[in-house]
Amino acid sequence: MKTRLTVALTALCGWALPAAADIKIAHVYDKSGGLEAYARQSQIGLMMGLEYATGGTMEINGEKITVIEKDSQLKPDIGRAMLAEAFGDDEADLAIGGTGSGVALAMLPVAEEFEKILIVEPAVADTITGAAWNRYIFRTGRNSSQDAISNAVALGREGVKIVTFAQDYAFGRDGIAAFKEALSDTKAELVAEEYAPTDTTDFTAYAERMFNALKDQDGEKRIFIIWAGANNPMSKLQAMDPGRYGIELATGGNILEALKAYKEFPGLEGSAYYYYEIPQNPVNQWFVKEHLARYNMPPDFFTAGGMSAGIAAVEAIKKAGSTETEALITAMEGMSFETPKGTMTFRPEDHQALQEMYHFKIKVDPAVDWGIPELVRVIPAEEMKIPLRNTR
């Protein structure tokens, strides 16, 4: 509080009392590049999460939140430079990002160098909270193991034979490695693996090899696909008529735009990170209602992730009572917080947010532009047994 002497001196000398310092949160994300659609969703969700968690004030304990946006352009070297600029020149208290796994991995050492918190959202490579992890890294986004294990739980029935198909980079390789590990604990059988460059547009040779690996197998036959961004192969593979060999496609959930292609696959099974109609909780109810009102469309896959990251940042600062890094780490390790997906908890050992996933089957409704991931069952976090992959 101001003393009478302070007020008097201020009046006489014209001194200005220092204003309360802003809480600076940097958002380093791929505003341009091949994952621009994901990045835009993440940014919208982040701002809605900060709004929700602060009750609309955009303040924590009277201190205004300032969000500093940086475009990493889906380039690891630029992402690294942008985060260093945010922590150094802009004096950000903590950061959120990145979109692509390659960019996020390049950013991890910067957080360690500056000894500042980086909340990773939505990049999913296991190595982020695995071999490349450091104590300043927390992740609200799901990791490849969570995707893979939940899909293995959904597909891993007795008699199912599976060939995997993924992009040949960290996201795809990590995802398949985790899927294989999880599938080994089920009654399904992995028959073969295929990988393709991210810019592949002709899938003929890959399809022939996968069809040949499965066509003479007994039981249910699935090609399980992990793919992010452009050139999704599902429609092209389906056009090659895998059904003539009794082969069906399977994949995880995706953004609404990608789900339009799922209308070709009624009954397709997999596991989803988020679909706006599935979670039933107060946070998601507010989120869906407000997003529909503001954007005339429901929230999407990565919008939910961005909101979760924003909520996590606010709840951490509230709990720590500070933006000081060590106080935040103490507050965040083991911290549970409410998100559009329900409760998430930062696992103390690797700071990965443990969270539920959703086994779905695609339902087709002519009145809806996309295939609807209809809930089969919620897969709770404790059922997935996500491996620890760091060396802490």
Image (cartoon, helix red, strand yellow):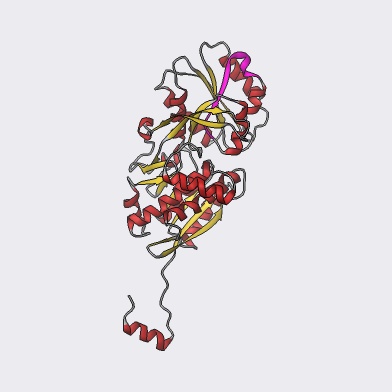
Q: Is residue 367 above or below residue 36?
A: above
Residue 319: x %, y % from top left: 33, 55
Query: Which part of the image, by quadrant, shows the C terminus?
Result: top left
Outermost front residue: 367
The picture places residue 322, in percent across and down from the top left corner, at 35, 60
Q: What residue span does the magenta drawing correspond to?
A: 241-253
Residue 280: x and y, percent? 43, 39
User: 278 or 59: which is nearer to us?
Assistant: 278
User: Residue 37 vs residue 6: left or right?
Assistant: right
Q: Quadrant of the N terminus?
A: bottom left
In the image, residue 78 sits, relative to residue 191, either above or below, namely: below
Residue 321 appears in the rendering: yes
Q: Residue furthest bottom?
A: 12
Residue at 54 percent across and 51 percent down: it is 44
Q: Residue at x 33, y 41 (%)?
A: 349
Q: Nearer the viewer, residue 75 or 65?
A: 65
Q: Residue at x 37, y 56 (%)?
A: 317
Give yes or no for residue 111 being in the magenta stretch: no
At which x and y percent is residue 123? 50, 42
Front one among 215 and 86: 215
Image quarter of residue 168: top right
Q: Quadrant of residue 70?
A: bottom right
Evaluate whether residue 105 shows in this view: no
